Image (cartoon, helix red, strand yellow):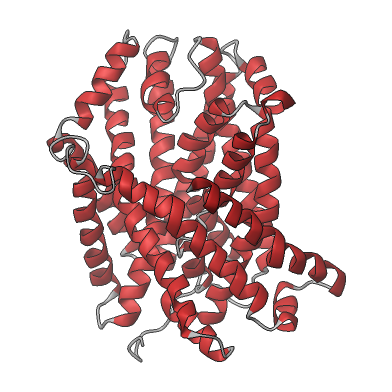
Amino acid sequence: MPPANKVHAQWSSRMGFVLAATGSAVGLGNIWKFPYMVGDSGGAAFVLVYLGCIFLIGLPILISEWLLGRRGQKNPINTMQELAAKNNRSQAWILVGFSGVLAAFLILSFYSVIGGWSLAYIKDAVVGSFTGQDGDGIGALFNGMLESPGKMIFWHTLFIAATIGIVSMGVTQGLERAAKTLMPALGILLVFLVLYGMTTGGFKQALEFMFKPDWSQLTGGVVLAALGHAFFTLSLGMGIMMAYGSYLGEDISLLQSARTVVIMDTVIALAAGLAIFPIVFANDLALGQGPGLIFVSLPVAFGNITAGWVVGVAFFCLLTFAAITSAISLLEPVVEFIEERTPFSRQVSTVVAGLAIWALGIAALLSFNVWSDFTILGLNIFNFLDTLTSKFLLPLTGLGVILFVAWCLDKESVRKELGLDVYDFSIWNLIARYVAPIGVLVVFFTSL
């Protein structure tokens, strides 16, 4: 139990909370992963299925995590422990909170490595490293970074230090202030890049690719990819939204806030596509580049287009801002747990959590170079952490959250807290009890 003299923090405003939650949801998933998944999965058909899955699966799980967090007013582990006891349920439900906090801890360890890459690319863009390079040249630049433990550790450390610095300042002065600064900056950069995309000659192709569906591209694999990304893009199953919900006052509407976050997250993802794909089409870059689309293909374009220096710097600043808004949210549930279960102050809890994550991140980045031969179940450390969290911890945690809210909490109390009439709540109940859990299970078993 937390020491008696510790008072649980609260968001200072609904807008601060919404911006922080949106910042968590946006992250690298929207700027880095969403565009290359659209490219790999046939364009508009993927986008439309993804939008449907966001509202049928992502939205109810997001609301459920906030609801549990607000009721518990504690870290995810203590919240599940207390709510299970209050509702006469098994203490085994504590595993839902534990797996969420563990997932956040593990994800940030390798996420910060990618965040370090984006920082390194800001430097490369500023000094003109992309200028005149072809694909082989940019590939050599990227591989040179991966093969250098010293460079990787430097950028990883810098990224983690920035994350620790923000989170250590607390909910209102740290998380909320960062969100109010970084999210508008991210929006401005994204608008600039979309406007630039309109001048490239590839914007019409990008619009058709993203919004004119070719239903022949709609395979089972595309549907499952959309379903999986819809679940993961909102930072679900990581303990983040439960932790953020624990700082919520009773006056904030969960439904309205969730709709706002989902809409903002989706708009930013679509805008990222409209910023990236015009450059891809205008420069005849391959669509199916996977993760290399951001770190190899686009820098080739930045190095060979008019105003490429400015566009490159803006793009990797955008990527870094998105990474930091997610990183601070990943650190938060771990810090909240340590702060509430130990005598440590907020600052000490943040440093302890951050250093432990930094150390695991060192192991993850060394898997690209000096520890490349070391594997766990056939995977290097980086890929093992990614697979463990994305294929196991996240879907199982999200499934546990939605099942607990839908089947273990008093239905009438949930209806009142969500502010729904009887008819609307019957729709909610159908989605929360059956549609969302089945969707998560489909993703889980298919990914295996």
Q: Position of residue 52 (x, y in %)?
A: 71, 45
> Which residue does the image show at 28% across and 43% down from the upper left?
378
Q: Identify which residue, 221 or 370, lies in the foreground.
A: 221
Q: Identify which residue, 424 or 187, lies in the foreground.
A: 424
Q: Position of residue 295 (x, y in %)?
A: 36, 26
Residue reaching furthest to the right: 423
Q: In which quarter of the image is residue 313?
A: top left
Q: Is residue 439 above or below residue 283?
A: below
How many numbered marks are there?
A: 0
> Which residue does the image show at 25% across and 21% down from the upper left?
141
Q: Can residue 75 be seen in this view?
A: no
> Which residue does the image show at 72% across and 72% down from the upper left?
418
Q: In this view, does 287 lie above or below 37?
A: above
Q: Position of residue 383 (x, y in %)?
A: 32, 43
Q: Can residue 104 be seen in this view?
A: yes
> Which residue does the image show at 49% across and 78% down from the upper left?
93
Left or right of 359? Residue 15 is right
Q: Is residue 300 above or below residue 89?
A: above
Q: Identify which residue, 392 or 313, lies in the foreground.
A: 392
The quadrant of the picture occupied by the N terminus is bottom left
Left or right of 108? Residue 273 is right
Q: Is residue 185 above or below residue 218?
A: below
Q: Where is residue 360 in the image (x, y as percent from the top left)?
A: 22, 54
